[in-house]
Image: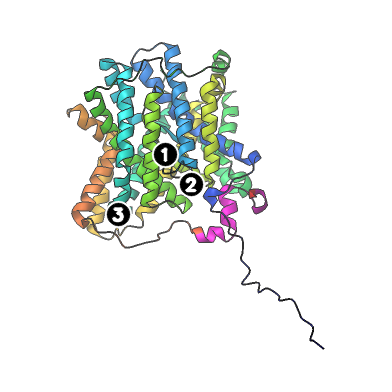
């Protein structure tokens, strides 16, 4: 008689366990993703609208033409954000990065526009984008020339050099400014963000910035610091007109000036990409930087074709990712889709723009300070007991903060040189890069995991859920 057979019991240890997605790839449920995306949109909108507004005003354009510039900028910024977060083949870092126009291009755009017209600005923008796509692989291959000593210094200056712009939002640029009420409102907004981050459960803490913006705006009403008149005056639907300023014109002096601007933008994009990579625990490598710069370049080409300006990564989004710990690129992608929507619905854009300056300035102070702190965290991976490294940091910080404290310091120099040095970010990058090369040559630094996130630990359970602000069940 045959012995009874028994089914083999699988070894629990040998059973393959489902692999948790990286926090960057987790897609939160829609009811959480929408408000999380609104945080990125509200924080970034001011910069996206201000750049074309200042250029249009400096060139004496009528209001309807300025509105066209703003709509085009929102459209391109949204498309660029989608490209950077979701990626298309070799384009896009596939990280939570918001894209938008850069303030670095304001002065060159105004000078070129006055001499050759806006069509020459857009032509130069197209060429700058093409060159960015072409040189992106070089940046990726030479990433070993940008060790934490260089990138940490650049990221820190990106954050700290933007703090004065946050202060400008608080005080206002009109005569008299927002006064003591504005200062108090900004302080209350910052305190609200801190209290939510400290006291609220993690699922609510992810919305600390959005709660601060909403509560601060509500408090602004009785203080007389809220103006929603623009919502009623804005049209419900409008179509961006890419040919309103004529076909792009290619003028050599304009192209040269914009290429200098684009060099500054590439340094900033590399710093922001590596900063986000440091925060989320993925993407601190050459291929990611190459794809990010290619997306920058492709978006800039599109921007010139649609009557807008050079596109770059937004430092605000870096700070927001660090503060909220919401690492999902799909959240930021949705904010890009909302930007595209705002480009076609000016009334919605006016509602976003109604957030009072002191409220936005208070939140921006937190965001920009956080970017600076991330830079210091990256810098901590360098050996600062080495006097040469300390000298590099000291001189790079000095060069980067001169334009912040003394904006006219480089006034006697030619415009082409000023364009670079007036950007503290570019000056910091050049000094840090040159001194690191002088002191250490081109040798690759020893691998150092540093104090960054532990992606493996995140995959063990709480990282994927906490990083996206969702539970394991909700993520599915």
Question: Against 212, is 443 above or below?
Answer: below
Residue 457 sits inside the magenta stretch: yes
Front disc: 2 or 3: 3
Determine the CA span between mark 2 and mark 1. 11 Å
Residue 354 sits inside the magenta stretch: no
- Considering the image in quadrants, where does the N terminus appear? bottom right
Tell me the tag on residue 315. Answer: 1
Determine the CA span between mark 2 and mark 3. 25 Å
- Most common secondary structure along the magenta stretch: helix
Q: Is residue 370 left or right of residue 38?
A: left
Residues in magenta, as a range:
456-474
Say which residue label 3 marks: 144
Q: Secondary structure at mark 3?
A: helix
Front disc: 3 or 1: 3
User: Which corner quadrant of the image does residue 295 belong to?
Assistant: top left
Tell me the tag on residue 322. Answer: 2
């Amino acid at each position: 008689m045959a012995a009874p057979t028994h089914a083999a019991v699988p070894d629990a240890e040998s059973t393959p366990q489902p692999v948790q997605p990286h926090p960057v790839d987790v897609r939160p449920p829609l009811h959480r993703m929408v408000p999380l995306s609104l945080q990125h949109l509200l924080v970034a909108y001011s910069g996206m609208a201000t750049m074309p507004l200042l250029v249009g005003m400096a060139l004496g354009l009528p209001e309807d033409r300025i509105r066209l510039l703003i709509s085009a900028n929102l459209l391109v910024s949204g498309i660029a954000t989608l490209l950077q977060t979701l990626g298309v083949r070799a384009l896009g870092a596939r990280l939570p990065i918001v894209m938008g126009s850069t303030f670095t291009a304001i002065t060159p755009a105004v000078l070129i526009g006055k001499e050759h017209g806006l069509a020459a600005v857009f032509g130069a923008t197209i060429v700058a984008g093409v060159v960015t796509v072409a040189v992106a692989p070089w940046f990726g291959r030479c990433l070993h020339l940008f060790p934490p000593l260089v990138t940490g210094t650049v990221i820190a200056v990106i954050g700290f050099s933007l703090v004065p712009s946050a202060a400008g939002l608080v005080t206002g640029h009109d005569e008299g400014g927002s006064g003591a009420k504005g200062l108090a409102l900004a302080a209350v907004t910052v305190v609200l963000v801190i209290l939510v981050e400290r006291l609220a459960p993690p699922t609510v803490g992810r919305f600390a910035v959005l709660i601060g913006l909403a509560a601060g705006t509500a408090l602004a009403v009785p203080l007389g610091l809220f103006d929603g008149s623009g919502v009623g005056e804005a049209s419900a639907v409008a179509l961006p007109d890419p040919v309103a300023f004529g076909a792009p014109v290619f003028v050599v002096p304009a192209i040269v000036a914009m290429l200098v601007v684009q060099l500054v933008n590439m340094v900033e994009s590399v710093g922001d990409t590596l900063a986000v990579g440091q925060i989320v625990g993925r993407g601190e490598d050459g291929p990611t930087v190459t794809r990010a710069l290619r997306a920058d370049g492709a978006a800039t080409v599109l921007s010139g074709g649609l009557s807008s300006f050079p596109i770059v990564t937004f430092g605000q989004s870096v700070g927001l990712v660090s503060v909220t710990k919401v690492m999902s690129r799909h959240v930021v992608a949705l904010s890009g889709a909302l930007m595209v929507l705002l480009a076609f619905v000016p009334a919605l854009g006016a509602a976003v723009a109604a957030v009072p300056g002191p409220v936005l300035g208070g939140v921006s102070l937190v965001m920009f300070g956080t970017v600076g702190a991330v830079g210091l965290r990256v810098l901590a991976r360098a050996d600062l007991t080495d006097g040469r490294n300390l000298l590099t940091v000291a001189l790079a910080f000095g060069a980067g903060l001169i334009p912040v404290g003394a904006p006219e310091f480089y006034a006697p120099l030619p415009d082409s040189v000023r364009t670079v040095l007036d950007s503290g970010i570019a000056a910091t990058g050049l000094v840090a890069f040159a001194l690191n090369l002088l002191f250490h040559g081109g040798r690759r630094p020893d691998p150092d995991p540093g104090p960054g996130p532990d992606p493996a630990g995140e995959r063990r359970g709480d990282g994927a859920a906490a990083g996206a602000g969702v539970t394991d069940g909700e993520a599915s």
